[in-house]
Amino acid sequence: MVNTLFLPELREMLQLGQETDLREFCVTLNPGRTAEFMEGLEDAEVWAVLQHAEPYRRAEIFGYFEENRKLKMLTREPAEQAAALVEEIPPDDRVDLIHGLPAETVANILPLLPAIDRRDIERLRSYVEGTAGSLMTTDVAKLAERFTAREALEELGRRASDLETIYYLYVVDDNNLLRGIVSARQLVSAISNTTKTLGDMMETDVVVALVNEDQESVAGKVERFNLLAIPVVDSGRQLLGIITHDDVIDVVREELTEDAQRIAAVAPLEDDFLRIGLFKLSYKRGIWLTILFFAALLTAFALRAYEDELEAFAWLVWFIPLIISAGGNSGSQSATLVITAMTGGEVKNSDLPRVLSREFVVSLLLGGFLALIGFLVALAIAPTAWAALVIPCTLLSVIFCGCMCGVTLPILFKRMGLDPALMSNPFVAGIVDILGIVIYINVARVLLG
């Protein structure tokens, strides 16, 4: 929601060229609030206001706008001004923006950046999307192990404005190999000791991410060890950069969104729901809908195969929606629970026997309860009490199959190296629908002759 509180004043200041007031506006509030009050301005007006802020502050405020809006401004505004802004943006965020810009805009901006920044951008762009290398920032607090606490603080004071975070200080040797880590708290605590070096106080058992490691694995490490940042190293343990907790939050949100979309039988969207093209959105949804359509056809063929039984016992037709929905819903519940548990690291591939044993008990409890209700309803419709037993027997069997399929298929997919979320709710429901029809008619055959 756009905050319109300062819009008239901002537009008036721009119109009258009140540079002092505009500079004061850019520094009075924190960058996030400043960006919020500028949301209602046109892109050109936002850019004009930002030109009155110091370069580092301009980059901070700019970072709080939506991705698409940032890309539009960088594309439309003068390349010199855009380059000056990009230079101040943290390396990881800078590369994300470069990825989203048109090639022509990138070609105009890159030559205007300092050579060291250009090399950094090209190096970060070379890493595969979705890996630790594509997430990391190269603004790292790297210090030599010979530094005392006081010397380290003096060095940090000189470089602080160029660093993304100083919660952790990474100790490296002359070859840039990661030797250990010192927290800011440890450093401050040792300030009075003039002889203790970083090498003396550092922790050498450092949790690291390999540069080509999958981002989901990196996020799991940060969560497991409660880290604010994790260092990224290559196979030789050279320190390349760090991934901070804010980037990990973005990864977790992205992965959860993808899983939720897959669970709903939608191919993951690369853009926001309201921004993705309608044809592309239709394609993403249509892939799975087509697969599920053919799965539903199999259900229809299964019904056709049992035409004679359904004609002989017409009252069985009335319970087909009940049987199908009970099996599909139980399977969807189980699949959702196990997929989310696997995503959160609660369930691993080796846990399949335990998961199955638990689901065995739960499926019998659920199936027995719903079978009792189904039997009471069937008594009022079936010709005899014996015939009515078809419904509870089928419900118990179908719910049991649905639950077991729901937990087994995602784990099997994971074992095959596939995303368990691919075994989506509608897909599980489609499989259980076919099983439900087959079980229903065969139970009827046995009990009704």
Image: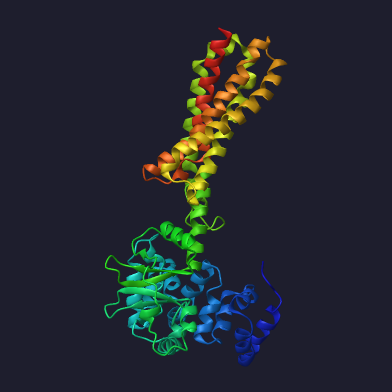
Quarter of the figure that contains the N terminus = bottom right
Residue 201 higher or lower than 305, as above or below = below
Residue 34 higher or lower than 412, as above or below = below
Q: Where is residue 180 in the image (x, y as percent from the top left)?
A: 36, 74
Q: Position of residue 96 (x, y in %)?
A: 43, 68
Give the image quarter of residue 448. Answer: top right
Residue at position x 45%, y 36% from top?
Answer: 353
Quarter of the figure that contains the C terminus = top right
Q: Where is residue 428 in the image (x, y as percent from the top left)?
A: 50, 35
Q: Position of residue 37 (x, y in %)?
A: 65, 76
Residue at position x 47%, y 87% from top?
Answer: 191
Give the image quarter of residue 336. Answer: top right
Q: Which residue lies furthest to the top in this view?
A: 449
Residue 403 higher or lower than 148, as above or below = above
User: Could one spot residue 240 in this view of the protein?
Assistant: yes
The residue nearer to you, when weighing 231 against 281, is 231
Residue at position x 41%, y 41% from top?
Answer: 413
